[in-house]
Image (cartoon, rainbow, N blue to C red):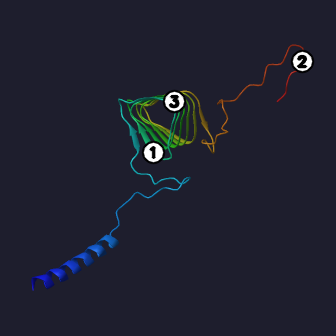
Amino acid sequence: MFTNKKGSEAGSSSHSASQQSSAVAPSRPAAVPPGTKPKSGAPSVLSPDLYIKGNLKTSSDIKIEGQVEGDVRARLLTVGEDATIRGQLIGDEVVVNGRIIGKIRGVKVRLNNGARVEGDIIHETIAIEAGAHFEGSVKRQENPLAEDAPGPIGKQRPPAPKEGSPPVKG
Protein backbone atom coordinates (compact mmCIF):
# COMPACT_ATOMS: atom_id res chain seq x y z
CA MET A 1 0.00 0.00 0.00
CA PHE A 2 2.79 2.34 0.78
CA THR A 3 4.89 1.17 -2.17
CA ASN A 4 2.17 1.78 -4.73
CA LYS A 5 1.64 5.31 -3.51
CA LYS A 6 5.36 6.09 -3.45
CA GLY A 7 5.90 4.48 -6.80
CA SER A 8 3.12 6.52 -8.39
CA GLU A 9 4.23 9.70 -6.60
CA ALA A 10 7.82 9.12 -7.53
CA GLY A 11 6.81 8.53 -11.11
CA SER A 12 4.63 11.62 -11.21
CA SER A 13 7.20 13.79 -9.42
CA SER A 14 9.98 12.70 -11.78
CA HIS A 15 7.62 13.34 -14.68
CA SER A 16 6.80 16.86 -13.43
CA ALA A 17 10.49 17.57 -12.75
CA SER A 18 11.35 16.62 -16.31
CA GLN A 19 8.56 18.89 -17.56
CA GLN A 20 9.92 21.78 -15.49
CA SER A 21 13.49 21.30 -16.62
CA SER A 22 12.47 21.21 -20.26
CA ALA A 23 10.09 24.15 -19.88
CA VAL A 24 12.55 26.45 -18.10
CA ALA A 25 15.99 26.75 -19.64
CA PRO A 26 18.79 28.42 -17.70
CA SER A 27 19.22 32.03 -18.75
CA ARG A 28 22.43 32.79 -20.60
CA PRO A 29 23.46 36.12 -22.06
CA ALA A 30 22.82 36.22 -25.78
CA ALA A 31 25.91 36.49 -27.91
CA VAL A 32 26.08 39.70 -29.91
CA PRO A 33 27.17 39.03 -33.48
CA PRO A 34 30.27 40.97 -34.53
CA GLY A 35 29.54 44.23 -36.31
CA THR A 36 26.20 44.82 -34.58
CA LYS A 37 25.70 47.54 -32.02
CA PRO A 38 24.48 46.42 -28.62
CA LYS A 39 21.36 48.07 -27.23
CA SER A 40 22.27 50.99 -25.05
CA GLY A 41 21.61 50.56 -21.37
CA ALA A 42 23.27 52.38 -18.52
CA PRO A 43 26.43 54.22 -19.55
CA SER A 44 29.89 53.03 -18.58
CA VAL A 45 31.12 55.34 -15.82
CA LEU A 46 34.74 56.26 -15.14
CA SER A 47 34.83 57.30 -11.47
CA PRO A 48 36.35 60.56 -10.21
CA ASP A 49 39.42 58.82 -8.75
CA LEU A 50 40.29 57.16 -12.07
CA TYR A 51 43.16 58.43 -14.26
CA ILE A 52 43.54 56.92 -17.73
CA LYS A 53 46.38 57.53 -20.16
CA GLY A 54 45.37 56.17 -23.56
CA ASN A 55 42.47 56.17 -25.99
CA LEU A 56 38.95 54.96 -25.16
CA LYS A 57 36.47 53.66 -27.73
CA THR A 58 32.96 52.27 -27.27
CA SER A 59 29.84 51.96 -29.40
CA SER A 60 27.72 52.65 -26.30
CA ASP A 61 27.43 55.53 -23.85
CA ILE A 62 30.14 56.65 -21.46
CA LYS A 63 30.26 59.12 -18.60
CA ILE A 64 33.66 60.36 -17.51
CA GLU A 65 34.08 61.73 -14.00
CA GLY A 66 37.87 61.26 -13.74
CA GLN A 67 40.85 62.30 -15.85
CA VAL A 68 41.75 61.05 -19.32
CA GLU A 69 44.83 61.81 -21.41
CA GLY A 70 43.88 60.52 -24.83
CA ASP A 71 41.08 60.45 -27.36
CA VAL A 72 37.59 59.29 -26.42
CA ARG A 73 35.00 57.97 -28.90
CA ALA A 74 31.44 56.98 -27.89
CA ARG A 75 27.81 57.23 -28.95
CA LEU A 76 26.84 59.52 -26.05
CA LEU A 77 29.85 61.00 -24.30
CA THR A 78 29.18 62.89 -21.06
CA VAL A 79 31.96 64.74 -19.27
CA GLY A 80 31.30 65.23 -15.55
CA GLU A 81 31.76 68.50 -13.66
CA ASP A 82 35.10 67.55 -12.10
CA ALA A 83 36.43 65.62 -15.11
CA THR A 84 39.37 66.72 -17.25
CA ILE A 85 40.09 65.32 -20.70
CA ARG A 86 43.21 66.16 -22.70
CA GLY A 87 42.54 64.83 -26.17
CA GLN A 88 39.94 64.62 -28.90
CA LEU A 89 36.29 63.80 -28.11
CA ILE A 90 34.22 62.13 -30.85
CA GLY A 91 30.58 61.17 -30.48
CA ASP A 92 27.08 61.31 -31.84
CA GLU A 93 26.26 63.43 -28.80
CA VAL A 94 28.86 65.15 -26.61
CA VAL A 95 27.75 66.80 -23.35
CA VAL A 96 30.41 68.77 -21.49
CA ASN A 97 30.11 69.79 -17.84
CA GLY A 98 33.85 69.64 -17.02
CA ARG A 99 37.13 70.62 -18.68
CA ILE A 100 38.29 69.69 -22.19
CA ILE A 101 41.66 70.55 -23.68
CA GLY A 102 41.43 69.39 -27.27
CA LYS A 103 39.11 69.09 -30.25
CA ILE A 104 35.45 68.04 -30.04
CA ARG A 105 33.73 66.38 -33.03
CA GLY A 106 30.07 65.59 -32.56
CA VAL A 107 26.72 65.55 -34.31
CA LYS A 108 25.19 67.26 -31.24
CA VAL A 109 27.50 69.16 -28.91
CA ARG A 110 26.32 70.80 -25.69
CA LEU A 111 28.44 72.89 -23.34
CA ASN A 112 26.59 73.23 -20.05
CA ASN A 113 27.00 75.93 -17.40
CA GLY A 114 30.44 75.43 -15.85
CA ALA A 115 31.97 73.69 -18.88
CA ARG A 116 35.49 74.77 -19.83
CA VAL A 117 36.67 73.99 -23.36
CA GLU A 118 40.03 74.98 -24.87
CA GLY A 119 39.99 73.75 -28.44
CA ASP A 120 38.05 73.58 -31.66
CA ILE A 121 34.54 72.21 -32.07
CA ILE A 122 33.24 70.60 -35.28
CA HIS A 123 29.51 69.95 -35.03
CA GLU A 124 26.19 69.60 -36.80
CA THR A 125 24.23 71.26 -33.97
CA ILE A 126 25.64 73.05 -30.94
CA ALA A 127 24.28 74.57 -27.73
CA ILE A 128 26.37 76.68 -25.37
CA GLU A 129 24.73 77.60 -22.08
CA ALA A 130 25.38 80.83 -20.23
CA GLY A 131 28.27 80.27 -17.84
CA ALA A 132 30.17 77.92 -20.15
CA HIS A 133 33.73 78.99 -20.98
CA PHE A 134 34.89 78.31 -24.54
CA GLU A 135 38.13 79.32 -26.19
CA GLY A 136 38.64 78.12 -29.74
CA SER A 137 36.83 78.05 -33.04
CA VAL A 138 33.53 76.48 -34.05
CA LYS A 139 32.68 74.98 -37.42
CA ARG A 140 29.38 73.52 -38.56
CA GLN A 141 29.76 70.49 -40.79
CA GLU A 142 27.18 68.08 -42.25
CA ASN A 143 29.08 64.99 -41.13
CA PRO A 144 31.38 65.96 -38.26
CA LEU A 145 32.24 62.32 -37.52
CA ALA A 146 33.73 61.68 -40.96
CA GLU A 147 37.33 60.53 -40.70
CA ASP A 148 38.34 62.79 -43.57
CA ALA A 149 37.08 65.90 -41.79
CA PRO A 150 39.28 68.88 -42.62
CA GLY A 151 42.13 69.33 -40.17
CA PRO A 152 42.57 73.02 -39.34
CA ILE A 153 39.49 75.09 -38.71
CA GLY A 154 39.09 78.49 -40.27
CA LYS A 155 39.86 80.00 -43.63
CA GLN A 156 43.44 79.52 -44.69
CA ARG A 157 45.24 82.30 -46.47
CA PRO A 158 46.99 81.67 -49.75
CA PRO A 159 50.78 81.91 -49.55
CA ALA A 160 52.17 85.43 -49.82
CA PRO A 161 53.37 86.31 -53.33
CA LYS A 162 57.12 86.29 -53.84
CA GLU A 163 58.84 89.54 -54.53
CA GLY A 164 58.72 90.42 -58.21
CA SER A 165 55.89 88.00 -59.09
CA PRO A 166 52.49 89.24 -60.30
CA PRO A 167 49.76 89.51 -57.64
CA VAL A 168 47.48 86.52 -57.24
CA LYS A 169 43.80 87.17 -57.96
CA GLY A 170 41.21 85.03 -56.28
Nearer to the camera, 9 or 120: 9
- How packed is label 1: few (under 14 Cα within 10 Å), some, or many (20 or more)? many
Residue 162 position, x and y percent, is: 85, 16
- In three-dimensional space, the C-alpha distance between marks 3 and 2, rounded to whole angstroms, equals 46 Å
Which residue corresponds to mark 3? 70
Mark 2, secondary structure of its residue: loop
Which residue corresponds to mark 2? 165
Mark 1, secondary structure of its residue: strand
Residue 99 position, x and y percent, is: 45, 28
Nearer to the camera, 42 or 165: 42
The residue type indicated by label 1 comes to Asp
Residue 87 to residue 61: above or below: above
Q: Nearer the viewer, mark 2 or mark 1?
A: 1
- Which tag, 3 or 2, sits closer to the chain's start? 3
Residue 71, which numbered label? none
In the picture, which quadrant includes the C terminus? Answer: top right
- Which tag, 2 or 1, sits closer to the chain's start? 1
- In three-dimensional space, the C-alpha distance between marks 2 and 1, rounded to whole angstroms, equals 56 Å
Judged from this view, the residue extending furthest toward the left is 1
Residue pictured at 10% horizontal, 82% vertical: 2
Which residue corresponds to mark 1? 61
- Which tag, 3 or 1, sits closer to the chain's start? 1
- How packed is label 2: few (under 14 Cα within 10 Å), some, or many (20 or more)? few
Residue pictured at 52% horizontal, 33% vertical: 55
Nearer to the camera, 149 or 5: 5
Residue pictured at 71% horizontal, 27% vertical: 156
Residue 11 to residue 42: above or below: below
Mark 3, secondary structure of its residue: loop
The residue type indicated by label 3 comes to Gly
Contact flag, marks 3 and 1 (Cβ < 8 Å): no
Side (left or right) of 56 relative to 149:
left
